[in-house]
Image: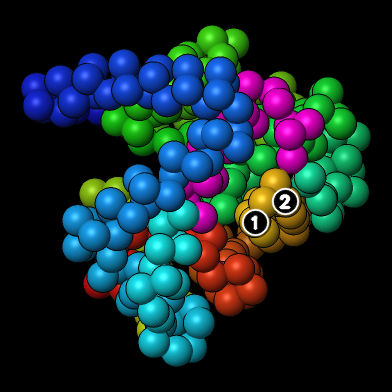
């Protein structure tokens, strides 16, 4: 099924965003991270003031994650953590991981999958930095990661990746095209890790509701259904920002690569989503300012 063409206003918006992306990249790479980071303070303060919906969503989420009523300083810290992770993407995608102090847990899981071959579904969330996983790529040159996302977002990300590092443009697979699943299968057969953010659904995508930070929220079943269909292991990756230049990357197994032919696929999918949600909740409580879904997630 071919994805529908975006409306003209969306196309104009994407074209207009490219010069801004390139300007941000230029400032970050030429002024360096400390100077660019100083610019985040007035930018985040501005958005705390004017972005009412995002500010309310931040308060709603933080009250759940912190277990108390968040202050305006908490909301600002939440916005600043998001801005910092966005800024750091420029350096991480430009292979400047030496700028950061990155601690990695669960590297043995990745090494085991690389040794066996066959690829892996790597699931993350809009939490911290997914790009910080590139630090492991520098230590393991055989590790290649492709990102899967919906076509509208894929166009924006391709523009951003091309502006930062043209070699990265092919690392994005757009969903919604007739050959999307073929591309995913091919990358896996090449031994690549295929990354998906499994905390947001789009349109009529199948969703499963589970308790998350005190109330039920909907999570997409698609990434886990794909893994079961293609019989690939699923590994959770969380790259948590801890302030300054410190990140922590954790890898955890969610689905074993061996699936019995007569297994209960629907039960397997639900069990995988439940396990994912439980781990994500733990990370949100441990590092609450790293959650970057600025909308009513429980609606």
Quadrant in the picture for the C terminus: bottom left
Question: Colour mode?
Answer: rainbow
Residue 280 picture quarter: bottom right
Quadrant in the picture for the N terminus: top left
Label pair 2/1, CB-CB below 8 angstroms: yes
* 222 to 49, vertically: above or below: above
Q: What are the residue bounds of the magenta stretch? A: 81-100
Which residue is the extreme one toward the top? Answer: 166
Q: Left or right: where does residue 152 sit relative to residue 222?
A: left
Q: Which residue is mark 1?
A: 243
Instruction: Depth check: give the residue in front, 225 or 3.
Output: 3
The residue positioned 29% from the left and 59% from the top of the image is: 48
Instruction: Depth check: give the residue in front, 274 or 23.
Output: 23
Q: Which residue is mark 2?
A: 246
Q: Position of residue 282 (x, y in %)?
A: 62, 74
Q: Is residue 267 visible?
A: no
Q: Give the CA separation, mark 2 to mark 1.
A: 6 Å
The residue positioned 60% from the left and 68% from the top of the image is: 287
Q: Position of residue 255 (x, y in %)?
A: 69, 58
| Magenta stretch: includes residue 86 | yes
The residue positioned 31% from the left and 16% from the top of the image is: 19
Q: Is residue 107 visible?
A: yes
């Amino acid at each position: 099924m071919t994805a529908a063409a975006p409306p003209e206003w969306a196309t104009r918006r994407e074209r207009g965003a490219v010069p801004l992306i390139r300007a941000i990249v230029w400032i970050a790479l030429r002024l360096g991270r400390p100077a660019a980071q100083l610019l985040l303070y007035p930018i985040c303060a501005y958005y705390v003031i004017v972005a009412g919906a995002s500010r309310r969503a931040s308060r709603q989420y933080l009250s759940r994650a912190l277990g108390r009523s968040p202050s305006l300083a908490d909301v600002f810290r939440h916005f600043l953590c998001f801005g910092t992770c966005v800024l750091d993407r420029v350096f991480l995608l430009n292979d400047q991981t030496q700028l950061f102090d990155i601690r990695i847990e669960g590297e043995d899981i990745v090494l085991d999958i690389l040794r066996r071959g066959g690829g892996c579904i790597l699931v993350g969330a809009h939490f911290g930095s997914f790009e910080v996983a590139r630090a492991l790529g520098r230590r393991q040159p055989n590790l290649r990661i492709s990102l899967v996302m919906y076509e509208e977002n894929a166009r924006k990300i391709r523009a951003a990746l091309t502006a930062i590092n043209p070699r990265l443009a092919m690392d994005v697979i757009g969903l919604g095209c007739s050959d999307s699943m073929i591309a995913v299968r091919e990358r896996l057969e090449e031994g690549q890790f295929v990354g998906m953010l499994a905390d947001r659904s789009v349109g009529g995508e199948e969703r499963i509701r589970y308790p998350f930070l005190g109330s039920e929220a909907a999570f997409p079943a698609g990434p886990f259904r794909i893994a079961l269909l293609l019989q690939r292991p699923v590994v959770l990756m969380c790259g948590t920002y801890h302030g300054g230049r410190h990140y922590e990357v954790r890898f955890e197994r969610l689905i074993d690569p061996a699936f019995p032919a007569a297994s209960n696929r629907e039960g397997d999918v639900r069990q995988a989503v439940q396990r994912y949600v439980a781990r994500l909740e733990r990370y949100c409580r441990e590092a609450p300012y790293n959650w970057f879904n600025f909308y009513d997630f429980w609606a």
